[in-house]
Amino acid sequence: MELTARQHRWTYPRPAQVMGILNVTPDSFSDGGHYLDAGRAVERAQEMLSEGAEFIDIGGESTRPGAAPVDEAEELRRVIPVVRALAGRTRAVISVDTRKAGVARAALDAGASLINDVEASRSDPELWRAVASVGAGYVLMHMQGRPETMQAAPAYGDVVAEVGAFFRERLLRLQEAGVRAGQVLVDPGIGFGKSLDHNLRLMRGLGMLSSVGRPILLGVSRKSFIGRLFAVEPHQRLGASLACAVWAAGAAGASVFRVHDVAATVQALRMREVLESTPDHGETRVNP
């Protein structure tokens, strides 16, 4: 199975990859306000790349539960200077987390290679056409409802089956808009219109979602379901976040992990791979 994102190409299965989260917002649930300055944001991106991230995901609009929408002009003001600066300094994958076609187009023009779309349930295909026009990668994420209301009363008959059906239907819609399946990662949207039970069922059912034939991107880092399970604040959720990543990479074959704590996640994933590898008589070394 191949994934392409403009000039980038990967073949799966392969060692798990890490996507570093870079929120240039004042109100994201874990790190809002930390990287509003473009210079600080670029420094943080470079730090995450040095820690082993292969993707940097830049977001200019918080999609936490209850978050208010941001207008397009403000989102562009936050995101595009960071994309431009990073594009001139790295060959790593620059991803932009946006729901807006105008922001997606501007980000791709500025040097992004991947669009991470939490609102893949859209009826307007304009964002998809922007992705198709340059052969960019696309994260197809499931969300029930919208960020402003998604946690009000999420309901499913069988959450794993319904998310899988959503992926299959959207892959067909994407092809109609010119986006090939080989450009798409799928993300089950942990925490996006799901209860604690829904999130746990989705985690346990990740292996079933692999039947759609696309690499799985998983975003569980510091999520609120961990807080509800263990009564801990976002900065206290690293242990459970790492456990989810290691389990999903092994038991479910997830391919890409969207995280805040890059160095720790890379180390945990590489350690799992060392332990699962066939032993030889030489010394084992791991490059991050």
Image: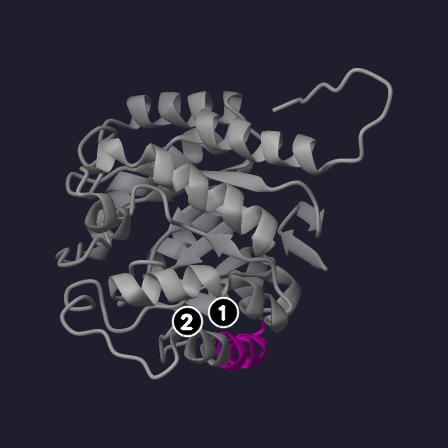
Query: Where, by quadrant of the figure, is residue 285 drawn?
Result: top right
Range drawn in magenta: 167-178
Relative height, residue 190 to residue 223 (above, below): below
The answer, for residue 53, to whether it is visible in the render is no
Residue 47 located left or right of residue 194: right
Q: Which residue is mark 2?
A: 126
Q: What percent of the width, then of the height, locates residue 177?
A: 53, 76
Relative height, residue 231 to residue 142 (above, below): above
177 vs 49, nearest the viewer: 49
Q: What percent of the width, then of the height, locates residue 143?
A: 33, 68
- What is the tally of numbered marks visible in this picture? 2
Residue 110 located left or right of residue 4: left
Q: Which residue is mark 1?
A: 129
| Magenta span: chief secondary structure | helix
**Residue at 17% of width from left, 43% of height from top?**
231
146 vs 73, nearest the viewer: 146
Q: Amino acid at mark 1?
A: Arg
Q: What percent of the width, then of the height, locates residue 245?
A: 48, 44
Q: CA distance from mark 1 to mark 2?
A: 5 Å
Crowding at label 1, few (<14), some or many (≥20) Cα neighbours within 10 Å?
some
